[in-house]
Image (cartoon, rainbow, N blue to C red):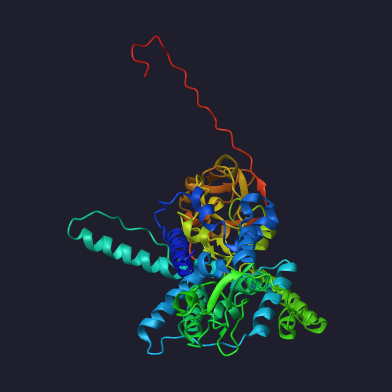
C-alpha cells in the first residue's frame, strides 16, 4: 500500500465522524432518529468505557475496539475518531493559512503534567466521581461546545432568518422556540474552546499530549503498537520536513527518533518525506526500555497519592455542603422560597447515585430534549457534579410521551426505557405550598397545575367559593408540568421534590360515565 494514502484515509474518516457528531448536537428539529445515535457515539472512548463498566454489554464495548486499534496502529482514535482532535486540526489548518510561520517544531514532553492529570482522573473515578473526567474528556467537551455555544448561535440565526422571510410572506422555515441559555454555564465551554484554540493554533496537538487523559492513556498503550512510525537513518537526508510538519512535535530530527507515545497517527510526515527516510511498519524489535521511558510510566509515590486522595475527599465533602444549601432563586416577587433537597434526574437514570456516577456531561441529552427541560447544572449536584444535566421545571417540563434522552445517552447514565414504563416512572413527587397559591392568598380560581397534570395527580377541590389544588402524590410521576404551569411569582405554589431512587407511580383508573338512554324516544341522542 502506498503510505501517502494513509493521510487521505485518515482525513476522510475524520470528516465523517466530525460531521455526524456535529449533526447530532446541532439537530434542533430532531430530524435524526435517536435510534441511530449510538452508532455514531459507539467508538467514543470515555462514554463507551463508562457504559461498559455499568452494563458489561457488547453494545458498550466500543472502547475495546479503540484499544485494539491503538495496539495495532497507534493513536488512530486521536487522529480520526475523536471529534475534538478533528477540531484541533481545523484550528491548525487556520494556523497554516494565516500565519507566516507555517510549520511546527519539536516539543519537550510534559510527562509530569500529562500523567498527573491521568492519575488524578483515575483516582477520582475510583472514588466514584467523574469530576476530572467530565472536565477533560474530549468528547464531552466537544458536546458542551456544540450544545451550549454553537447551537444557540445557530438557533438565533435560524429564527432571525425565519422572521425576516415572514415579512416577504415566505414561510419556508418556521421559528424554533428557545427557552434561553445560562450565561454562567456558557463560561465553561467558552473557556475550554479558547484553551484548545490557542494550544492547537500555536502548538498543534499539545492539548492531546498534555491535558487530555484519553490521549495520555492511549499514548501508554501505543508504546506497544505493532505498527510504528520510524526514521530510516540510511535514507534520511536531514531535510527536517518531517519535524516541521509533525503537529504533535514528537519527531526529533537531530537524534532521528519518534516519541510514538505522543504521535497521533496523522501521517503528515509520510507525505512530505522526499527520500523515504521515514517509514510506517511492523515493529517487533526487543529493545531495553530507556530509563526516561520508565520514568514516564512510573506511578505517583505514596505521599503524592495520599495528597490527591485527601484533596478528592475534601472536595467531595464540600460539594455536598454546597448542594444542601442550594435554593431556587427567581427574579420575580414572592414570600415563601422553595428549597429543593435534590435535583430531579431524567427518566431512565434509575437514581441520583447512578446518574451522577455515570454521566460525563456531554450534553447530548440536553441538545436532543424537545422541550428543553434538561439543562446543565451548576451547583445543584455539588461541585463534583457540575455541568451534569438536571430537570429544570422553571424553564420547561418533561413531555409525557417522550423518551428521547434515554435513547441518545452514550454512556449508560440514562438507560433505555420504554414509553409505557416511563409513564409510570416516578422521578419525584409534587409538593403543594398553600401559602404561595393565589387561590389561598387572593381567593381567586386558577387550576393551571391540575389542567396540565398528565396523570391527574393534582385535582381541584372546594375551598370556600373557589377551588384549590390537592395533590395525590401516589399518582405523580414528577414530570414538572404542574410546576412549570404555576403562574405564582417568584416562587411556585407547587414544585417537584426529587426521588433519590426512582419509584413506580400508581396508575389512576379512569371513571367511566354511563348515561342511560331512553330508546323509546325517536332521537335519543
Image quarter in which the C terminus is found: top left
Placement of 445 over or under 12, stated as above or below: above
Placement of 122 over or under 296, stated as above or below: above
Name the one closer to the observer, 33 or 490. 33
Residue at x 68%, y 62% (from the top left corner) = 357
Name the one closer to the observer, 481 or 302. 302
Spot occupied by residue 153 in the image (x, y as percentages of width and height): 38, 69
In the figure, is residue 298 to the left or right of 395? right
Q: Furthest residue to the right?
A: 302
Q: Quadrant of residue 255?
A: bottom right
Spot occupied by residue 96 in the image (x, y as percentages of width and height): 39, 82
Q: Quadrant of residue 137?
A: bottom right
Q: Furthest residue to the front?
A: 234
Spot occupied by residue 511 in the image (x, y as percentages of width and height): 55, 30
Spot occupied by residue 75 in the image (x, y as percentages of width and height): 58, 69
Placement of 43 over or under 182, stated as above or below: above
Name the one closer to the observer, 165 or 411. 411
Q: Is residue 368 visible?
A: yes
Q: Is residue 330 visible?
A: no
Q: Furthest residue to the left?
A: 168
- Number of labelled discs? 0
Name the one closer to the observer, 281 or 45. 281
Residue at x 71%, y 82% (from the top left corner) = 293
Amino acid at each position: 500500500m502506498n503510505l501517502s494514502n494513509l493521510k487521505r484515509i485518515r482525513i476522510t474518516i475524520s470528516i465523517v465522524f466530525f460531521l455526524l457528531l456535529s449533526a447530532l448536537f446541532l439537530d434542533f428539529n430532531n430530524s435524526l432518529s435517536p435510534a441511530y445515535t449510538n452508532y455514531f457515539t459507539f467508538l467514543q472512548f470515555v462514554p463507551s468505557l463508562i457504559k461498559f463498566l455499568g452494563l458489561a454489554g457488547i453494545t458498550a464495548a466500543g472502547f475495546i475496539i479503540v484499544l485494539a486499534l491503538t495496539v495495532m496502529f497507534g493513536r488512530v482514535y486521536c487522529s480520526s475518531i475523536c471529534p475534538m482532535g478533528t477540531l484541533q486540526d481545523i484550528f491548525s489548518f487556520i494556523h497554516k493559512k494565516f500565519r507566516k510561520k507555517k510549520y511546527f517544531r519539536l516539543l519537550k514532553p510534559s510527562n509530569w503534567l500529562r500523567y498527573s492529570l491521568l492519575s488524578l482522573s483515575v483516582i477520582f473515578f475510583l472514588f466514584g466521581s467523574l469530576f476530572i473526567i467530565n472536565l477533560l474528556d474530549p468528547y464531552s467537551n466537544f458536546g458542551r461546545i456544540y450544545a451550549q455555544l454553537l447551537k444557540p448561535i445557530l438557533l438565533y440565526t435560524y429564527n432571525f432568518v425565519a422572521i425576516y422571510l415572514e415579512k416577504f410572506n415566505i414561510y419556508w422555515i418556521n421559528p424554533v422556540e428557545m427557552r434561553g441559555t445560562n450565561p454562567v454555564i456558557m463560561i465553561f465551554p467558552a473557556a475550554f474552546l479558547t484553551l484548545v484554540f490557542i494550544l492547537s493554533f500555536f502548538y498543534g496537538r499539545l492539548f492531546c499530549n498534555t491535558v487530555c487523559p484519553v490521549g495520555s492513556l492511549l499514548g501508554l498503550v501505543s508504546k506497544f503498537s505493532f505498527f510504528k512510525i520510524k526514521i530510516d537513518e540510511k535514507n534520511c537526508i536531514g531535510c527536517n520536513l518531517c519535524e516541521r510538519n509533525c503537529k504533535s512535535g514528537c519527531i526529533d530530527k537531530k537524534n532521528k527518533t519518534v516519541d510514538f507515545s505522543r504521535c497521533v497517527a496523522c501521517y503528515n510526515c509520510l507525505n512530505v518525506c522526499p527520500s523515504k527516510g521515514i517509514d510506517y511498519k511492523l515493529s517487533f524489535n526487543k529493545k531495553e526500555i530507556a530509563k526516561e521511558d520508565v520514568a514516564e510510566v512510573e506511578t505517583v509515590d505514596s505521599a503524592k497519592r495520599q495528597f490527591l486522595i485527601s484533596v478528592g475527599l475534601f472536595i467531595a465533602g464540600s460539594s455536598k455542603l454546597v448542594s444542601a444549601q442550594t435554593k431556587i432563586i427567581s427574579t420575580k416577587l414572592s414570600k415563601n422560597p422553595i428549597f429543593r433537597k435534590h435535583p430531579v434526574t431524567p427518566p431512565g437514570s434509575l437514581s441520583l447515585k447512578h446518574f451522577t456516577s455515570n454521566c460525563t456531561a456531554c450534553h447530548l441529552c440536553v441538545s436532543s430534549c424537545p422541550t428543553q427541560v434538561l439543562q446543565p447544572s451548576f451547583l445543584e449536584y455539588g461541585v463534583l457534579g457540575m455541568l451534569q444535566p438536571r430537570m429544570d421545571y422553571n424553564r420547561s417540563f418533561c413531555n409525557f410521551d417522550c423518551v428521547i434522552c434515554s435513547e441518545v445517552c452514550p454512556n449508560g447514565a440514562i438507560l433505555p426505557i420504554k414509553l409505557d414504563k416511563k409513564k409510570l416512572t416516578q422521578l419525584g413527587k409534587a409538593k403543594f405550598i398553600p401559602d404561595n397559591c393565589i387561590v389561598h392568598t387572593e381567593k381567586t380560581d386558577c387550576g393551571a397545575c391540575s389542567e396540565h397534570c398528565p396523570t391527574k395527580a393534582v385535582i381541584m377541590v372546594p375551598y370556600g367559593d373557589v377551588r384549590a389544588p390537592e395533590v395525590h402524590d401516589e399518582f405523580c410521576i414528577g414530570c414538572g408540568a404542574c410546576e412549570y404551569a404555576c403562574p405564582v411569582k417568584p416562587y411556585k405554589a407547587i414544585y417537584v421534590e426529587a426521588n433519590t431512587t426512582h419509584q413506580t407511580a400508581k396508575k389512576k383508573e379512569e371513571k367511566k360515565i354511563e348515561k342511560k338512554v331512553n330508546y323509546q324516544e325517536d332521537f335519543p341522542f
